[in-house]
Image (cartoon, helix red, strand yellow):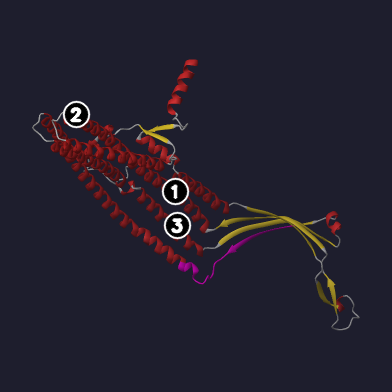
Amino acid sequence: MKAKLTCLLLLVSLLITGNGVLAQSFSIREAIEYAVKNHINIKNGQLDIQNADAKVNEIKAIGLPQVNGNIGYSNSLIIQKAFIPAKTFDPNAAEGDVIAAEFGVANSGQAGISLSQLLFDGSYTLGLKAADVYKELSRKSLTQSKQQIAENVTKAYYGILVNEERIRLLDLNIGRLDSLFKETKALNAQGFVEKIDVQRLEVQLNNLKTEAKNVQRLQDLSYYLLKFQMGMKTTDVVTLTDKLSNVNVNEVVPETNSEFKYANRIEYSILQTQDRLAELDLKNQKVGYLPRVILSGSYGYSAGRPKFFDLITKPWFDAASISVGIQIPIFDGFSKKYKIIQSENNLRKVKQSFELLENSIDFQVKQTHLTLTNAFETLQEQKANMELAQEIVRVTKIKYKQGVGSNLEVINAETSYKEAQTNYFTTLYNALIAKVDVDKAVGKLYND
């Protein structure tokens, strides 16, 4: 048990950096999964789904019984008087005389409960359907956010892998050129080569070191970008487990006969949902011409007394009622008519958007496939150029050491080799990004 605890503590100590920050390792797939769980946009999208759930329940609540209680007390500081002909109580009263009689008491109270139930409302039924569709739209919007985050994380991850390989090759070039510089410097001290040969190599070496520093700074920024896309703090420590050598370049080759469906694109699926919402909105405006039927009832007690304490001690009297009301729209100044026109136009706009989106998707698919094809072909050419430049460097060095070549030829060969390496990795990155764009265009980049 003690040995296991020691091993566990050792493992934890290896994962903890010197400043106490826990280091985390991610493959490209793990980085995407982390991002779709922790990115702020995803958390906000999940809150939108919860709001959509609450909206559905809010609309459902309209169709449930509505119960309200009420308690009231009032004191009539000056009781309203009613005017009654005096002859009503005194036959001998003069014609035209009236009596101002108080009808009411100073203190009154009431308490009761009321209930109403919606029996029929066409808008309510359609509202329930629209709420469910709106909830579906929130889920699809969350999926769209996940796909966007997966795209951003993938591109940022590939950027780091390519920069890592560039840094590795730059270090190798620096080491190789540094050895040549030291050898040439020693030959210059012995009088076999001129000082200008040493200076040329020194300039080349310094340029390589400067470029290596610049690429390293770019790599630091690339890590910040990846952590930002993953929803992590910039102070977190991240290591990548995937390597560029593990990427099968042949997988980058574009598929020529791949099947494609518009429904695979989340944008198309969202538009379909918006189309259903527009249709429901139009139906909702039309059912506004139908009547509403409401059942209501009430039960309560009331009392009135001249004195306040009599109101408390004396009996109260109950009362109850039940009623059914039908609200029939007759004329609203053509308000519903114009609302229907607006809903019809909105629905027509959504219908027309399908053709625009389909054309846009077709263009994206063709464009990304063409870009990927060009990038892959260029990648093959740049790989051949890099291998050829490497061979030229090897031959020129041999010639230089044997005294049949010049120092300038070595420097030019090294420069060409470095440029070939830069071109190769730039093209490799472009090919990887083009592959991501193709997968996004055909709807295969990320699925829940």
Inspect the image, locate mark 2, and give the three-letter code of the amino acid beneath it.
Ala
**Closer to the camera, 444 or 235?**
235
To which quarter of the image does residue 237 belong?
Answer: top left
Circle on res. 280 = 3
Determine crowd level at label 3: few under 14, some 14-19, many 20+ residues with C-alpha closer than 10 A.
many
Spatial separation of the CA atoms under disc 3 and disc 1: 14 Å
Circle on res. 136 = 1
Spatial separation of the CA atoms under disc 3 and disc 2: 86 Å
To which quarter of the image does residue 250 belong?
Answer: top left
Residue 384 visible: no
Question: In the displayed structure, would residue 410 be above or below residue 13?
Answer: below
Residue that badge 2 annotates: 186
The disc, 3 or 1, on the residue closer to the chain's N-terminal end is: 1
The disc, 2 or 1, on the residue closer to the chain's N-terminal end is: 1
Dot 3: what SS? helix
**Closer to the camera, 200 or 41?**
200
Give the residues drawn in magenta, as a range.
Answer: 319-338
Inspect the image, locate mark 3, and give the three-letter code of the amino acid beneath it.
Leu
**Closer to the camera, 3 or 14?**
14
Inspect the image, locate mark 1, and give the three-letter code of the amino acid beneath it.
Glu
